[in-house]
């Protein structure tokens, strides 16, 4: 199994949309955008939008490819250059979960953030009830820093979030 992290390209829209379509019921439990992705075209438009946000240094997003097929994404968002921190987001096809792909992808992204972008701290916010997603920052050495009650209003209710932090050890 070959894992690659690629810059987002509209050519990935077909594969990414297929994953969203197949996993929509699970993704929409945690990701508000899952219900807004209704076609390969809307995915391509999102990828173009992200390319622009990357040029503006607002986000840094990478597509996760396994054996040259796009299966998910990882990103740095809310990049704060003045304070040298950013937040991480991630999602992955259910077809390839459980093989350490997301953990490896985030490890590479974090190394890039610390060593190439010069960031000092990475934050991850995760719904308190999303057990698989909460396991990832723990595996990567993040520390639980806070619990935010009623952090977002989603699916007709307020949701609590954990926030994990990792400081550059160098």
Image (tube, rainbow, N blue to C red):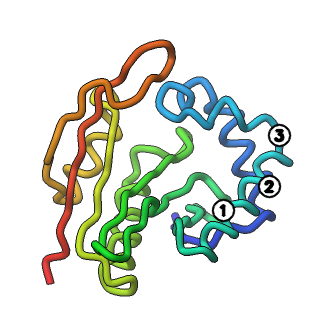
Instruction: Read off the residue under disc 3.
Output: 39
Disc 2 residue crowd, few under 14, some 14–19, many 20+, Cα 10 Å? many
- Asked whether, in this view, residue 37 is left or right of residue 61, the answer is right
| Image depth: mark 1 or mark 3 in front | 1
Label 3: few (<14), some (14–19) or many (≥20) C-alpha neighbours in 10 Å: some
Mark 3, secondary structure of its residue: loop
Percent from the top left, x then y, of residue 98? Answer: 39, 44
Q: Which residue carries the number 1 mark?
A: 50
Q: Is residue 80 left or right of residue 149?
A: right
Find residue 63 and report its horizontal and vertical position in percent. Answer: 59, 63
Residue at the extreme front of the image, as rendered:
82
- Between marks 1 and 2, how big is the CA–CA gap? 10 Å
170 w.r.t. 39: above or below: below
- What residue sits right under mark 2 in the picture? 44
Q: Are marks 1 and 2 in contact (CB under 8 Å)?
A: no
Point 53% across, 67% down: residue: 58
Residue with the most extreme right position:
41
Foreground: 68 or 113? 113
């Amino acid at each position: 199994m070959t894992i690659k992290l690629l810059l987002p390209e509209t050519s990935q829209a077909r594969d990414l949309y297929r994953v969203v379509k197949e996993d929509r019921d699970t993704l929409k439990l945690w990701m508000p955008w899952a219900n807004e992705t209704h076609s390969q075209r809307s995915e391509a438009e999102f990828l173009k939008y992200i390319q622009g946000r990357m040029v503006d240094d607002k986000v840094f997003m990478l597509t996760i490819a396994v054996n040259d097929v796009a299966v998910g994404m990882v990103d740095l968002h809310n990049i704060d250059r003045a304070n040298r921190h950013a937040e991480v987001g991630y999602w992955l096809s259910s077809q390839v979960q459980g093989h350490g792909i997301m953990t490896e992808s985030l490890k590479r992204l974090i190394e890039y953030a610390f060593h190439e972008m010069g960031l000092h701290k990475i934050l991850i916010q995760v719904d308190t009830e999303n057990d698989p997603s909460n396991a990832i920052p723990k595996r990567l050495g993040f520390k639980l820093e806070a619990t935010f009650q009623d952090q977002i209003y989603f699916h007709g209710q307020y949701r609590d979030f954990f926030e994990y932090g990792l400081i550059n050890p160098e």
